[in-house]
Structure formats: C-alpha cells, structure tokens
Amino acid sequence: MSLSCPQFPIVSHNTLSSASELREQFVEGFADLANGSRTLRQVVPACIGGAGFSRKELVLWGVEAGHSASHVRSVIRRILCRSGVRQRKRGAGRRIKPKILAILYIRA
C-alpha cells in the first residue's frame, strides 16, 4: 500500500533508525504544529504505512505528550485524508431512504 503523495513526501522508514525516533519526531511535530511545522505531514504516513503503527498507538503517543485525544485523532485523520489514505470508503455513512430517492426521482 503506497501512501506517497506529491504534496506530502514520506520519510522513509529506512532513514529512521528506530521506532523511538519516529515517536520523538511525532511528538516534536505536535509541539511545532502551531508554528506550521511540516514534520507531522511526513511522520504520520511513515508511522502508519512504513513502520506499521496503528492510529491508536499514535493517539496514545499524542495523549502521553499532553494533547487531548480528540485533537490528536483529528490531526491524524486530516493528514491521512490529504495524503489519500482514508479509514472509511468514500460515501460511507447513512444510506438515503428509498422514499426520499423516489421523491427526488419524481421531481427531477
């Protein structure tokens, strides 16, 4: 599964010597988030795609660094969606009821 995107280059797992370095870069990226740091845009896909960490692990790292769980989840989701990795399929969610489809069909 390729997570590369021209806008957000991925830091190759081969260039990072260990999981602890990935974790340090992830935590530092959150610290620099207010300054517009691009570190997280590179580290998050590398953690999930290259190193095989789960989103839950990344959220745990962010919470341990002092950030709220909802904020960490939101940032991770936005980064991954922008790089083309979605947790759900496009269009996932509530289905349109057949009665509403019939009304729309009649009006069209």
Image (cartoon, rainbow, N blue to C red):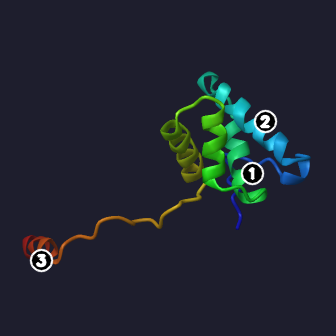
**Residue at screen point 83% across, 42% down:** 20
N-terminal-most mark, 1 or 2: 2
Give the left or right position of residue 76, taking residue 31 as reference.
Answer: left
N-terminal-most mark, 3 or 2: 2
Real-space Cα distance between discs 3 and 2? 54 Å
**Residue at screen point 88% across, 46% down:** 16
Q: Residue 67: where, in percent of width, then height?
A: 57, 31
Residue underneath mark 2: 24
Residue underneath mark 1: 46
Q: Quadrant of the N terminus?
A: bottom right
Numbered label attached to residue 7: none
Q: Nearer the viewer, residue 104 or 42?
A: 42
Q: Three-letter amino acid code at disc 2?
A: Glu
Q: Nearer the viewer, residue 35 or 73?
A: 73
Label 1 crowd (10 A; few <14 / some 14-19 / many >=20): many
Front label number (1 vs 2): 2
Residue underneath mark 3: 102
Real-space Cα distance between discs 1 and 2? 13 Å
Q: Residue 51: where, in percent of width, then height?
A: 78, 56
Q: Secondary structure at mark 1?
A: helix
Q: Three-letter amino acid code at disc 3?
A: Ala
Q: Three-letter amino acid code at disc 1?
A: Ala
Q: Based on the displayed image, in which of its 4 quarters is residue 86 positioned?
A: bottom right
Q: Residue 48: where, in percent of width, then height?
A: 69, 55
Give the left or right position of residue 92, taking residue 6 as reference.
Answer: left
